[in-house]
Image (cartoon, helix red, strand yellow):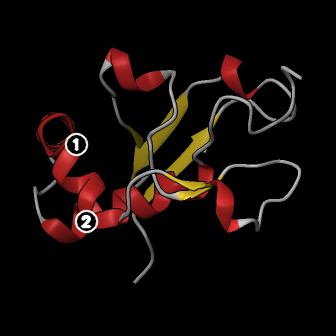
């Protein structure tokens, strides 16, 4: 099954902190809460531009913990977009966002 969610962080290169989320469901743009639009999502990953495989820099919440921590606002987004509030949809959302997630300093632009 192909993920119906696509997520893209609008900024690339050394200016990640200047971007915003562009997330859609089956091609329809989702409206994120203001406090989530311009910040990392806190998903689990290694966000170190020097050594992106160094487990010492692993941070963020795994899929299960992230869903529990974010279920309230995510459910509101789903309701507004007519998306079924199902565990599988929340997992697919996480997986789409996780691929594009970032952290302040992870691009090296502020060094």
In percent of width and height, residue 7 lies at 52, 48
Q: Position of residue 103 (x, y in %)?
A: 62, 37
User: For the residue labelled by badge 1, is the local secondary structure a helix, a strand or a loop?
Assistant: helix
Q: Quadrant of residue 70?
A: top left
Numbered tag placed on residue 64 in the rendering: 2
Say which of 20 and 40 sits in front.
40
Q: Horizontally, is 17 left or right of 50 in the view?
A: left
- Front residue of 81/35: it is 35
Quarter holding the N terminus? bottom left
* Residue 18: percent from left, percent from top: 69, 17
Return the x and y of residue 21 as percentages of the image width and height: 52, 32
Q: Which part of the image, by quadrant, shows the C terminus?
A: top right
Observer-nearest of 25 and 11:
11
Among the two numbered marks 2 and 1 on one chain, the one whose residue lies closer to the N terminus: 2
Q: Which residue is mark 1?
A: 70
Q: Residue at x 29, y 53 (%)?
A: 66
């Amino acid at each position: 099954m192909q993920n119906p969610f696509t997520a893209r962080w609008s900024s690339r290169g050394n200016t990640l902190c200047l971007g915003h989320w562009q997330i859609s469901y089956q091609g329809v743009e989702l409206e994120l809460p203001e406090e989530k639009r311009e910040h990392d999502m806190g998903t689990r990953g290694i966000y170190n531009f020097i050594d992106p495989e160094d487990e010492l820099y692993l941070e963020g919440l795994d899929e299960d913990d992230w869903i529990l921590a974010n279920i309230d606002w995510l459910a509101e987004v789903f309701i507004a977009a007519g998306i079924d509030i199902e565990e599988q949809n929340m997992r697919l959302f996480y997986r789409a966002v996780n691929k594009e997630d970032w952290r302040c300093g992870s691009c090296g632009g502020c060094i």
